[in-house]
Image: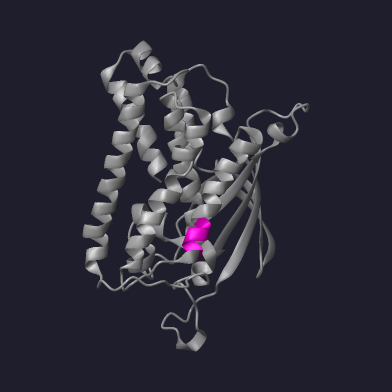
Amino acid sequence: MRSFFLHIVLGFIGFTCFSQSGINTFLQPSDTLNVPRRNAVIISETLLASASLLALNKLWYADYPRSKFHTLDDNSQWMQMDKMGHVFSAYQLGRVGADILNWSGVSEKNQLIYGGTLGFTFLTAVEVLDGFSEEWGFSWGDMAANAMGTSLYIGQELLWKEQRVTLKYSFHRTQYASQRPDKLGDGFSEEFLKDYNGQTYWLSANLHSFFKDSNIPTWINVAFGYGADGMLTGSYDGANNVFSNQNRVRQYYLSLDVDLTRIKTNSPVLKTVFSIFNTLKVPFPAMEFNEENGIRFHGIYF
């Protein structure tokens, strides 16, 4: 979710330090290499990444025993919802990394090399920390998911020079967090990140970009979602599991969406706001298919 914070920082600085015209000038991407901007981006990202890793190491991993570096096969955990989170995070971090380098006028090639890989690089460092924690371990499945998210961003830029298919996220509260607040979160802000039962990850495809000669509005998307429900633990072992009252089921969704970045505006401020919120799926009616109940319809789905 760091993509939110980086865009918000840029927007906040602009709003507090400049007039309306100054804000627009500040947020407008540079047509040529702007060395002060580039240097500010490099320094800021280095400091943010270092501070994040130090904070994780001290505030999170310090609560668990250390160990020798080891790997962990967790590919069957949480019905792969955690892996979807890795794909999403790597994609969004790569997107914001490239966008900020574009803001500083860096070449398209270097945007992809140094910006598009930001998510993979940062999440690899986090994975290494996992490898030295007895509670977790270095997961090759997580690394594969990180690579998928990075490849989705960079691959589309190389193929189409645009993001025709974006990764998005939606969330609704469930009954399960209150049963295991230590694992699934205590309160909305924690559940938003921890309760896999309420999370849905979407592949949101822009129709007009695939059918350019059509009259389809440029901002309309069709979205395909994946979620899971009934999970109180990462894996389930029937009667041997302490939390035996689980009814774990995969969920698949079809819905419409809006690509906010394709709404036409000349305002750099609005473009920044739209870019921030384009990480979230816009609520729409949705059709759900799951292994237990077949097809269900939702009047509005988050």
Residue 200, image quadrant: bottom right
Q: Position of residue 13 (x, y in %)?
A: 29, 25
In this rendered view, identify the residue nearer to me: 5 or 174: 5
In this rendered view, identify the residue nearer to me: 104 or 181: 104
Q: Residue at x 28, y 73 (%)?
A: 67
Tell me: residue 17, above or below residue 298.
above
Q: Position of residue 113 (x, y in %)?
A: 48, 39
Residue 17, image quadrant: top left
Q: Residue at x 47, y 82 (%)?
A: 244
Q: Is residue 302 visible?
A: no
Q: Position of residue 274 (x, y in %)?
A: 49, 30
Q: Is residue 168 visible?
A: yes
Q: Residue at x 40, y 55 (%)?
A: 124
Number of numbered callouts drawn:
0
Q: Residue at x 38, y 50 (%)?
A: 122
* Coloration of the structure image: one colour
Q: Position of residue 264 (x, y in %)?
A: 57, 21
Q: Residue furthest bottom?
A: 239
Tell me: residue 6, above or below residue 240.
above
Magenta segment: does it hold 257? no
Q: Main secondary structure of the magenta part?
A: helix
In this rendered view, identify the residue nearer to me: 39 or 205: 39
The span picked out in magenta is: 141-145
